[in-house]
Image (spheres, rainbow, N blue to C red):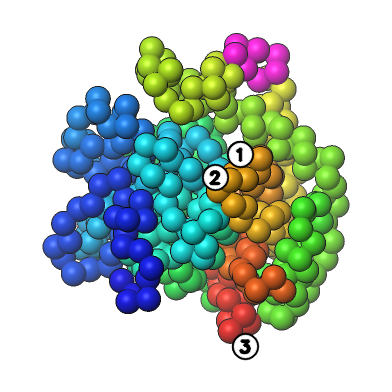
Amino acid sequence: MNNSTRWTADKAHVFTQILPQVTGGVRVGIKDLIDLEGVITTAGSRFVASHATPALRDARCLEGFRQAGADLVGKTNLHELAFGTTGVNAAYGTPINPLNADWIPGGSSSGSAVAVAMAACDVALGTDTGGSVRIPSACCGIAGLKTSYGRVSLDGVWPLASSLDIVGPMARDLAGLTLGMQLLEPGFRVANDHSSVVGRVQVSVLDPRIDRAVDHALGAAGFTIKPTEIIDEQWDVAVSATDDIIVAEAANANAHLQAHWHELDSERKLRYGEMLGADRGRMERAYERQTIWRSYLAEQVAAVGLLALPTIPIFPPSLRDASANWAALSRLTSPISLSGLPAIAIPIRSEAGIPASLQLVGPPGSEDMLLAAGAKIEASQSD
């Protein structure tokens, strides 16, 4: 850990559980939704932790990490049950954002983002359902990769919304993300080439400095920029459908805890999800919209090669303003989750003097191309 780090990992509420380091290999943080043999999976909940037994085996996504001899340094903290965008956790403490202790770390993979931002590990695994890898990456000034839906096994991963959940790596830079993919998928290689054209998604953001930072970063990296046909109204329909699916599926995924929902910080959202899930007509419309949106966004990507937009529409809000901004944080990420497409969050310079985050979206299975294009953007930021 860097000597300049202001907090040690334990005092920054990074880990729910710290594990002994024995191999001297790549240091990896594992979001505490992902099973490790012999270790309790807490899901960021004291109630779950107090009633859980140690996992009988590793989650399948960790096979490559074990084969490579990675140091699994700890289970990283998260928004309880992964059900939130702010990363605030009253039970284990909210991970401290290394950029500014007064800012939220972003959620739900808050501990994973903070762990790599403060150099407590080299790579961290997060999960992403509506933005839970990309949002904390944006808030903490690091890089994060939402993998294509279905690419990485979810066997042994605590579910939030099974039709959207993915596992993806987080790191300080694109090289770290590449390493994370190589550990998740031995034999993975970054593409030799990538699309030189991006479709610029012009949905509204709350801070225009972020839009300007994205446009400047794309221009500096030499991309040809074309506008897309996507408009705010279409985008908002996708946001609404994603929200409905997440809360309804989350209530179902945590139905085994229903008798104890009153002991969870997520109780209100779970109760709402239960009610929503019982509204058959509304859920049928949500899934119909998902089918339509997946086809539409895939067509938009195919027309240009890549899509580009901000990762979050605001700079990280303060902890005191967290509850007022939870919905805004996922507005630009959740429709990408609904599509199932892969996306990468890349820190970029902004006129505000703090990092903004650029989100690149590619065709299904194009993580290799996204990392190549992201590396080009990253390199242009250091000029």
For image coordinates 79% across by 62% down, the residue present is 208
Which one is in front in this view, the residue at disc 1 or the one at disc 2?
1
The answer to whether the residue labelled 1 contacts the one labelled 2, judged by CB atoms less than 8 Å apart, is yes
Say whether residue 56 is left or right of residue 365: left
Image quarter of residue 324: top right
Image quarter of residue 377: bottom right
Cα distance between the residues tagged 3 and 1? 38 Å
Residue furthest bottom in the image: 383
Examine the structure image and report whether residue 135 is included in the region drawn in magenta.
no
Disc number placed over residue 86 in the picture, else none = 2
Mark 3, residue position: 383
- Give whichever of discs 3 and 1 has the lower sequence position: 1
Mark 1, residue position: 323
For this rendering, which residue is in front, 266 or 284? 266
Which one is in front in this view, the residue at disc 3 or the one at disc 2?
2
Cα distance between the residues tagged 3 and 2? 32 Å
Residue 120 coordinates in the image, percent (x, y): 33, 64
Relative height, residue 292 to residue 203 (above, below): above
